[in-house]
Image (spheres, rainbow, N blue to C red):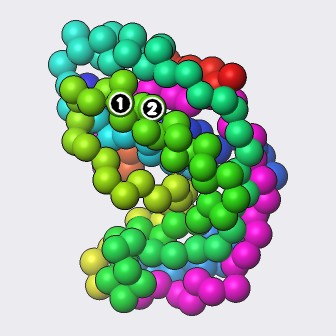
Amino acid sequence: MRVFVALELKDEDVRRRIAVAQEKLAAPGLRSVDPAAFHMTLKFIGEVPDASVQRIAGALRGVRQPSFDARFSGMGAFPSPSRPSVVWVGVREGSEGMVALQAAVGEALRDWGREERGFKPHLTIFRVAQGARVPELDGWQDFGTARFAEFQLKRSLLTSAGPVYSDIERYGLG
């Protein structure tokens, strides 16, 4: 089973504002991420045997972090605007909560997945085909603030229409 740990963006107003930006930026070679699936990946674990999933879920039950607010603002591209593979929306305020949670998740799951280095909180909104050009990303400032009160262990099922995500378990933040 292919699994990862995520923070879902559940705030409808923020998701709607970002979806409007997606519509305005749509261009050939840009594949939109479904707004219903907006999330920040805290740790990608990858393929694991089904028997390991319960051990991973159990390890995450020990993560204790406070809930937090995060303001989404600005856009960019990884690895760079001149050679993009994804277009993202940034987190301008409240990223400390995400960074602390990502570190706690990484510590709890140090025996699974690859080590995450240089975690930069962001929300992927487009996947970019090789050689595609990305429209101008400046000028997109504020998408609003969202509250994060839980994180999720998710399954990713790869299909020809794109990945389908489902929750394995949810974990509350204090």
Left or right side of 158 for 75 = right
| In the foreground, 165 or 39 | 39
Judging by the rendered image, the residue that carries numbered circle 1 is 107
Q: Which circle marks residue 104 in the picture?
A: 2
**In the image, is residue 158 above or below residue 135?**
above
Q: Where are the magenta residues, as a range? A: 132-160
Query: Spatial distance from mark 2 to mark 1, Cα to Cα?
Result: 5 Å
Is 15 left or right of 114, judged from the image as shown? right
Q: Position of residue 96 (x, y in %)?
A: 60, 49
Tell me: 91 left or right of 30: right
Q: Where is 158 relative to 120, above or below?
A: above
Which is more toward the observer, 169 or 56?
A: 56
**Does the magenta-highlighted stretch encompass residue 133?**
yes
Tell me whether the residue at label 2 lies in contact with that at label 1, contact meaning CB atoms closer than 8 angstroms: yes
Does dot 1 land on a helix, a strand or a loop? helix
Q: Is residue 132 visible in this depiction of the protein?
A: no
Badge 1, how many Cα within 10 Å: few under 14, some, many 20+?
some
